[in-house]
Image (cartoon, grey):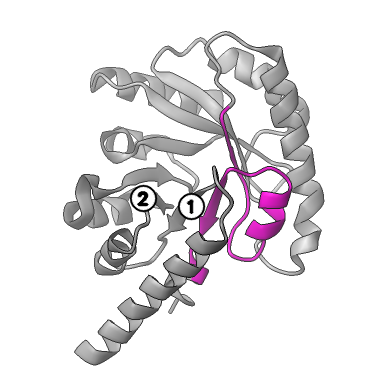
């Protein structure tokens, strides 16, 4: 069992090194750690990963007990309002702001702990009704509204794109989100810093980088297939 774990850990080391070797300058890697053990996450951190992405607050809390501030923590799942209080305590960025109700709760809970929370606006670039995110046509108005919350700081956009299939199928979603990013940046909305564009996962990150992503979220290609 110990030998199996060590082999698994060596694989994480190798995978992280390979990804870093191909990343252009200025592109940040988020290790998407959904369902991974705190020990696997620590190994990724030891291998040089500087940002851990978590989909669930409870999983993040467990991992945080072991890994702590060795890394930055990004929330990359759908954040429920009843989880915000705990989320603002450990996360350094929330990448999935998608409603004003959620913005209000993040603002309130951040104020309580004396924090200004960096956020990305999640864009539903495929305009799929079953998915979370702000529709592209509503993004500008949404951002104007969200700037009234003083304890959140809008730092850019995030989009999902298809998780499986031909990576080329994701390109149009990434192009649209980059165009939206550039347009909002050009508006120079007070209090908004359009710095980060988070797009692309294991299946599609190369296409996402070609289309302007400067944050990519990779899980399987670091940790191997989920059990």
Question: Residue 172: percent from the left, percent from the top?
Answer: 82, 49
**Residue 169 appears left or right of 195:** right
Report the magenta residues as a range. 195-221
List the residue tagged with mark 2.
50
Residue of label 1: 29
> What residue is drawn where x is 35% and y is 45%?
73
Residue drawn at x 58%, y 30% is: 156
Camera-nearest residue between 184 and 56: 184
- Badge 2 vs badge 1, beta-carbon distance below 8 Å: yes
Q: Is 115 above or below relative to 119?
A: above
120 in magenta: no
Secondary structure type for disc 1? strand
| Residue 128 seen in the figure | no
Above or below, 135 against 47 in this view is above
What kind of element bears circle 2? Answer: loop
Task: State the image quarter where residue 127 is shown.
Answer: top right
C-alpha distance separating marks 2 and 1: 8 Å
Instruction: Work out which quarter of the rendered image holds the C terminus and state it.
Output: bottom left
Q: Position of residue 86 (x, y in %)?
A: 28, 38
At label 2, counting other C-alpha atoms closer than 10 Å, the crowd grade (few under 14, some 14-19, many 20 or more) is some
Whichever of callouts 2 and 1 sits on the residue coming sooner in the sequence is 1
Residue 210 in the magenta stretch? The answer is yes
Residue 15, percent from left and from top: 45, 72
* Quarter where residue 176 is shown: top right
User: Callout 1: few (<14), some (14-19), or many (20+) C-alpha neighbours within 10 Å?
Assistant: many
């Amino acid at each position: 069992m110990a030998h199996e774990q060590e082999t698994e850990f060596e694989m994480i080391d190798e995978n992280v090194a390979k990804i870093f070797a191909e990343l252009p300058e200025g592109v940040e890697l988020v290790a998407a750690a959904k369902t991974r053990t705190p020990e696997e996450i620590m190994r990724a951190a030891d291998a040089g990963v500087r940002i851990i992405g978590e989909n669930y607050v409870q999983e993040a809390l467990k991992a945080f007990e072991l890994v702590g501030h060795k890394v930055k923590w990004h929330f990359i799942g759908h954040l429920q309002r009843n989880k915000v209080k705990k989320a603002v305590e450990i996360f350094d960025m929330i990448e999935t702001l998608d409603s004003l109700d959620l913005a209000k709760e993040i603002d309130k809970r951040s104020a309580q702990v004396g924090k200004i929370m960096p956020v990305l606006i999640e864009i539903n670039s495929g305009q799929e009704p079953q998915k979370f995110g702000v529709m592209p046509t509503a993004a500008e108005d949404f951002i104007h509204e969200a700037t009234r919350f003083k304890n959140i700081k809008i730092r850019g956009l995030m989009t999902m794109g298809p998780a499986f299939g031909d990576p080329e199928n994701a390109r149009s979603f990434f192009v649209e989100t980059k165009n939206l990013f550039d347009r909002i940046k050009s508006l120079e909305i007070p209090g908004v810093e359009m710095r980060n564009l988070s797009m692309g996962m294991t299946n599609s990150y190369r296409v996402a980088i070609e289309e302007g992503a400067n944050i990519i979220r990779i899980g399987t290609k670091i940790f191997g297939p989920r059990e």
